[in-house]
Amino acid sequence: AWTKHQVSGFKDKDEFESEVVRHVETTLARSMFNCDESAAYSAASLAFRDRLILEWNRTQQRQTFADSKRVYYLSLEFLMGRALDNAMLNIGLKDVAKSGLSELGFRIEDIIEQEHDAALGNGGLGRLAACFLDSLASLNYPAWGYGLRYRYGIFKQEIIDGYQVEVPDYWLDFNPWEFPRHDVTVDIQFYGYVHKVQDESGRFVSRWEGGETVKAVAYDVPIPGYDTPSTNNLRLWSSKAASGEFDFQKFNNGEYESSVADQQRAETISAVLYPNDNLERGKELRLKQQYFWVAASLYDIVRRFKKSKRAWREFPDQVAIQLNDTHPTLAIVELQRILVDLEGLEWDEAWNIVTATFGYTNHTVLPEALEKWPVGLFQHLLPRHLQIIYDINLFFLQSVERKFPGDRDLLRRVSIIEESQPKMVRMAFLAIVGSHKVNGVAELHSDLIKTTIFKDFVNIFGVDKFTNVTNGITPRRWLHQANPRLSALIKSKVGSLDFLKDLTLLNKIELSINDKEFRREWADIKYSNKVRLAKHIKESTGVSVDPSALFDVQVKRIHEYKRQQLNIFGVIHRYLTLKAQSPEERKKAQPRVTIFGGKAAPGYWMAKQIIHLINTVGNVVNNDKDIGDLLKVVFLEDYNVSKAEIITPASDISEHISTAGTEASGTSNMKFVLNGGLIIGTCDGANIEITREIGENNIFLFGNLAEDVEDLRHSHTYGNHQIDPDLAKVFEEIEKGTFGNPHDFASLISAVRDHGDYYLVSDDFRSYIETHALVDEAYKNQEEWITKSITSVARMGFFSSDRCINEYAEGIWNIEPLKTQTKD
Ligand code: 26W
C-alpha cells in the first residue's frame, strides 16, 4: 500500500519469476532444469531480500537524516523462526510470489518449509524480542536490535526410546537473511590489568591494558515492518581472532597449532547459545559472551552518536537502551567506563547520563535464574569493570545510608556485592541501580517484584521507578501468517486487514456472534487446522488421532514450575478412570488428544524425567484397545517457532498451569486465545489479564492463588503433608510398573510426596481434575464453545505487541515513531 516506496524489485508475478530465474542461474549458478525446492527457496528469498535491502537503506538514511532518538534493544536471544513467509506478508507480495512459484512448478507452502528456523533463543524471552522487532518496524520506530550471531542455535530435540537426545543446530549453511559487514568490526579486550596514570591536567585516570583481544564482526539482518516503509536492523556480532602481529609471528615461527588454537578460542565466544532457560550456571564463557556482545554494541552506538557532534549530556536524548533481562547489564558498566576512562567525564556527570539511558526488564522471579557472578571471575576477566562496579556500589550504598542512616542490614541486603563465600556480583541489583526504569512483564509479576525480590529498592528509589508493561505478541506472525483462513474470515467482518495494525478492531467480530454462516466457517477453520496437525502427528510420531476429538495442548519449555508433571499425572488419572469404567459408561466420555511439546535443558534431570514419563504413558495409552480414540497422548519432538505456527491454530484448549506466582507472563497463552483456542490455567502471569479482557466465563481457571503459596509451602515442610488421594493412586500405578520401570520416575514422585512439593502439584491436583471435567462438559456443547471462542478472540486486542511497544516508547524510552510519507 506504500507504493511511493515500491520502486525496487518486482511489481508482478512475471517480474518475480524472472528474478527467481536470474538468482537460480547467476547467484546460485544452477540451471532451471535441476532447480529443486531448496534452490527455489534460496532464489525466492534472494528475490525478496533484494527488495528489503533497498527499503532498509532508505530507512537507515531517513533515520540518520531525521536525527531523532533511537532505541537499542539488547537481547542475548532473538527467536526469529523463519523469515521468508514473514517478509512476503509484511511487504505484501505473498500472492504475487504464490502465483509466480506456481508457474515455475512449486507450491509456495513447500518452498516456505525449506527454510531452517533461526532459533537463537530458548523460549519466551527470545520470542518476545522477535515480536518486539516486528512491532518496532511496523510502528516506524527508529530501533535497532543487538545480539549474538551464534553458530549453533538452540539444540534440535530428538526423542529416542522416549528420551530426549540433543543434536547440534548448525543453521548457517545457507542464510540469505544476513549480511556480513566485514568493515564493521570492534576489537574487544579481555583479562589484563589496570593501572592509574596522571593525564596532562594532573588528573588520575585508569588505564586497562594487556590481556587479549578478540574481534567482533557485525552481521546485519533486515527486519521489515508490516505495511510500512520501515525496514529496521538487527545487528548480530560474530567473534573472530584479532589477527594481530602475535599470531602472525607464531605462524612464521612454525607454531601453526597454537596460532590455530587461538583462532578457535576466539571463535568459541559466539559459537553456541546456552540452552538453559531460567537457570543460571555461572560459566566463564557465558560472561565472556555477555561482555563481548555488550562492548561491541556500545562501541557501535557511541560511534553513531559521536557522528552527530553533540555534547555528551545529550546522549540520553538520542539514545535509549533497553536491557532484556540482566544478561546485558554489563552495558551499564561499559558505558560508565567509556565516559569516565576514555572520554574524560567526571564520575557524576557520566553516571547521570548512564542512568538516563538504560531501562531494565525483569522476566523471572525464580531465585535460581537470577544472575550472580563470582567477584574473582570478574577480577580476572574484566578487572576495570570490577573496580567500576565497586565504585557504583560505594556511591549507591552511601546514598542509601544518607536516606536510612544506621540500617546496616538494609545495606547488606541491597549491596550489589553479596558478601558471601565467594563474593558475588548481583546483576539484577546492578541493573536496577544503573537504570531509570525497571519493568515486569505482566501485572501480577510487576507487583510481585515490587513486594518480594526488589522490595528494598522500591523504598530506596520510590515506587515510580518500577512499572509494568504487559507482554504482547505480533498478530502478523501469530494470526495472519499462522492462521491465514481465520485472518481472512476476520477480515470479511472487520472490512479490512486493519486489525493487523490495530488489534482492538477485532472487537467488531463480536457483532457477528449470531451469524450462522460465520460460526460455521469459524468451526470449520479450527477443524481443518486440527486435520493439519493430526497429519503432522501421524508423520512425526506414527500415532493416529481423530481430528474431532478435543485437542488439549501444552507446548513450552519443560520446567517443574510450568508443571507438565501435573498435566501428565492428570492424564494418568483420566486413563485410570476410563479403564475402571464399563464399555457403556465409556461411551459418554469426551474423546481427547493430549499433546505435549518442549525442550528440557540438557542438564535438567527432572525435566528429562517428565519427558520420559509422557512418552511411556503415551506408549501404554495409545496402544490400549479398551481406550481407542477416547484418549491419545503424544509428545511432539523439537518444538520450535515454525512448529508453533502449526500447533497454535489447532488447539481446542491449551494449558498454562504454572504454580501461581512463578510464570512472569507467558505469551503462548495469548497466541492460543488469539487463534480461537480456550485455555485452562492458573491465576498466574498474563492469564489474569487475559481473564480480565475476555471475561471469566471464557477461561477455565483453577488452583491456589499466589498469595497462598508461601503458607502452603510452609505447611508442607512443618505440617503433616497429606497428598491428594487420587494423585496417590496415580503414583501407585506408576510404581506398579504400568508405565515402564518405576525406578525411572522415582524422583518425580518423591519431589511431590517426600520433598515438600515445592510446586504445589498435590495442592492443585483436585481442582485441576475437576476443571478438566468442566472442559469436557463445555466441549460437548459445541455452540456454547464456539461462542466462547469467538468472544475471546474479539476481546484480545490488548495483547498485541504493538500496544506493548507503544507503552515502552512512551513510558520508558521517550521516543516517537518516525514520520514517513503518508500511505496512499
Ligand atoms: C541465566 C539463565 C536464564 C536464561 C533465560 C535466566 C532467565 C532466562 C529468561 C529470563 C527466562 C525467560 O524466558 N523468561 C520468560 O520471559 C517471557 C517473556 O517476558 C515470559 O513470558 C515468561 O513468563 C518468562 O518465563
Image: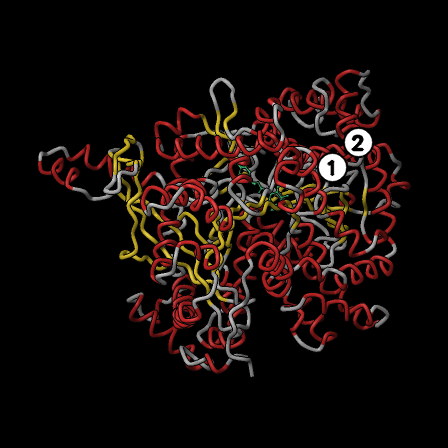
The answer to which of 679 and 43 lies nearer the viewer is 679
Decide: is 736 above or below 709.
above
Q: Earlier in the sequence, mark 2 or mark 1?
A: 1
Q: Quadrant of the N terminus?
A: bottom right
Q: Are marks 2 and 1 in contact (CB under 8 Å)?
A: yes
Q: Residue at x 36, y 43 (%)?
A: 340
Q: Nearer the viewer, residue 76 or 451?
A: 451
Residue at the (34%, 70%) spot, across then down? 23
> What residue did someone put label 2 on?
708
Q: Quadrant of residue 772?
A: top right
Tag in front: 2 or 1: 2
Q: In which quadrant of the rendered image does the C terminus lie?
A: bottom right
Q: Residues within 10 Å of mark 1 (few under 14, many from 20)?
A: many
x%, y% of residue 187?
Answer: 28, 45
Please name the amino acid that badge 1 sits on. Ala
Q: Is residue 758 left or right of residue 261?
A: right
The alpha-carbon separation of the residues under discs 2 and 1 comes to 9 Å
What's the mark number on residue 660?
1
Q: Amino acid at mark 2?
A: Asp
Q: Is residue 801 above or below residue 421?
A: below
Q: Residues within 10 Å of mark 2 (few under 14, many from 20)?
A: few
Q: Position of residue 293 (x, y in %)?
A: 39, 45
